Amino acid sequence: MEELAGADANALMERGIALLLGYAPKVLLAIVTLLAGLWLIKRFVNVLDKKLSARDPTLGKFLSGVISVALKVMLLISVASMIGIATTSFVAVIGAAGLAIGLALQGSLANFAGGVLILIFKPFKVGDVIEAQGYLGSVVEIQILYTIVNTFDNRRIVIPNGNLSNSSLTNLSAYETRRCEMSFGIGYDDDIDKAKAICRRLIEEDERALKEPEPLIVVGALADSSVNLTVRAWTRSADLWPFYWDMQERVKKAFDAEGISIPFPQRTVHVASDEQSLG
C-alpha cells in the first residue's frame, strides 16, 4: 500500500511539474503582454486625446475614454486566449456579466447615453459658461458619465450627464454678445431727460459697450418713491459683468455730481407724548 501511495504521489508531482512547465511560459508571456498592452494603450490614448482635443476638446475627452475602455477589454480577451481560456466562453461570460452590471447600473447607462446626446447635439462645449442643476460655472471637461464644472468661487462640481441631457440649462457663452440690463431710480422732482442723458453719455464713453444694437434708456416704472430708468446696453459676453459693476458706480457718482437724487425707502415715526396718549 505504501509503495502504491508513493507511486501515486510521484505521478501527481510529475504531472504537476509537466503542467507547470507547459503553462509557465504561457502565463509569463500573458503577463508580459498584459503589461506591455496596458502601457501601449495608455500612450496611444494620450496621443489620440491630444490630437482630438486640438480640434474639439469636448469630443476628444469623450472618445479617448471610450476607446481606452474598449482596447482594455480586447486586451484582456487576448491575454485570456494566450493562457488557454476559450475566448467564446470568455466572451459569453463577459456578455452575461455586462448584462447584469447594466441592469444594476441603469443610472450609469443613462449618464452614458446623456454624454452621447451632449456630444451629438452640442448644447455646450468645454470652455462654455453654463447654469444647470443649480450651479453656475465654466465647463472644464465632459467625461463618459459626468461633466465637470468649475464655479467662479473655485468649486469643482461633478454633474451626471443624464441630468444635463434631460433637464433645461442655460448656456451663457452660446453667443458672442449679451445684453446688459440695469435699473436706476431717480426722484420724482428730478429731471428725467437729464438723467437719461447722463446714462447715455456714460455708456458711450465705455469702450466695452457696443454701438450696435443701440443702447435703450427708457422710464421702466413709476414706483412708490422713485422713477425707475431701465437701461439696456449690449456688450461682449466676457465684458458683461465688469461693465455692469462699473456702470453702477459711475452712475451713482455722476448723479451725485449733477444733483440727481437716488431715493431710498424712508419711514417717518411719530412719537406721541404722555398727555396725548392719555387724552
Image (cartoon, rainbow, N blue to C red):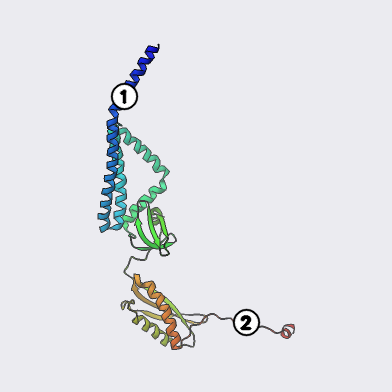
Choose between 232 and 93: the one closer to the eye.
Answer: 93
Judge the density around disc 2: few (<14), some (14-19), many (≥20) Cα neighbours within 10 Å.
few
Who comes first in sequence, dot 2 or dot 1?
Answer: 1
Q: Which residue is mark 2?
A: 269
Choose between 115 and 22: the one closer to the eye.
Answer: 22
Pinpoint residue 250: horizontal percent, then vertical percent. 41, 81
User: Judging from the image, what secondary structure is the residue with disc 2 in?
Assistant: loop
Query: Which image quadrant for residue 202?
Result: bottom left
Pinpoint residue 270: horizontal percent, then vertical percent. 64, 83
Q: Amino acid at mark 2?
A: Val
Pinpoint residue 181: horizontal percent, then vertical percent. 40, 75
The answer to whether the residues at label 2 and label 1 have Cβ atoms under 8 Å apart is no
Query: Which image quadrant for residue 195?
Result: bottom left
Q: CA separation, marks 2 and 1? A: 103 Å
Is 50 placed above or below 78 here? below
Q: What's the residue at 31%, 48% (across, down)?
A: 66
Q: Which residue is mark 1?
A: 17
Q: What's the residue at 37%, 62% (across, down)?
A: 138
Is 17 placed above or below 60 here? above
